[in-house]
Amino acid sequence: MIKKLYKYFSNPKRLAILNSIFLMIAVTANSYFQVFCIPSLWAIIVLTICFANTIFSPLLKRNKIIQLSGFINGISLFIFIYCIIFLERATIAGIFAILLFGLGLLIYIPHFFSIQLIWRNLIKPVTKKTRLFFILGFLLPVIISVFIGIEYSKQIKNFENFKAANYEKLEKGFLTEKILGMHFIYHTRLCTYDGWRPPKHEPILIMGMWFNNRIDPLDIGLKERVKLYKSFYPKRKIKYDCSCAWEYKNNYHNDKLWDLR
């Protein structure tokens, strides 16, 4: 059965169609359950490019474009691995969800694409250069993530000084706003572990946490956090018109936290 499926979808057109169907299902399901919430603008642009390339790369033949496609596929592999890590224990729970509802299969869509990209670009690449560009594409976000982790560690020390100054003096960096906005603007973990869904998914913030043992440098309640955010970023939104997902919209819009406005 597996061999027949592999042979059937080895056809580039069929694989492209299958990839587009899986991505469409994943995006549609996410709009309801919103596992990853609403990506930040830069993430939306990167995801659009990578998803489009995942669909059409099987159709490309030996030419210069396929090397660029291989590079983008490397970035895509990093994204799908990021999704797998973010899903955490849901990966195991998905096995039981398959038996009960069948929806558990959605959890393994990133796994499917990760295996496919490794096979088509690393194990069985169209050209040797494709393999090289694929590796370079994967290493790029890895290197960027390391720098983000270093910057986040600096912010941990910065927020320790902030606490020592009785929350009055805060030295701002490019992660400061994101750390202040944790848990009510930016979610940090899968829904099961992060309460009702904050509307934004910021990979930069999450990767920074991952490289620093998931430390939240500002260990205070949500109400206090919102007040501090408003005092340092008075022109920024604290509540958005859209919730993280349709399933959680009542939890989000009716929460007493917004009485602080």
Image: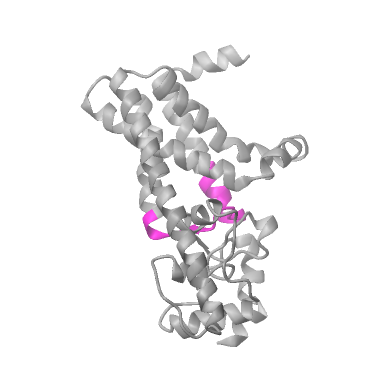
133, 66: nearer the viewer: 133
Picture coordinates of residue 72, whole percent (x, y): 34, 37
Magenta residues (range) = 25-42
Q: Residue at x 71, y 38 (%)?
A: 92
Residue 14, image quadrant: top left
Residue 181 in sight: yes
Q: How many marks?
A: 0
Picture coordinates of residue 215, whole percent (x, y): 59, 60
244, 145: nearer the viewer: 145
Picture coordinates of residue 146, whole percent (x, y): 43, 48
Q: In which quadrant is the C terminus drawn?
A: bottom right
Picture coordinates of residue 149, whole percent (x, y): 47, 53
164 displayed left or right of 93:
left
Residue 71, image quadrant: top left
Q: In which quadrant is the N terminus drawn?
A: top right
| Residue sitting farthest toward the left | 64
Magenta stretch: includes residue 126: no
90 displayed left or right of 52:
right
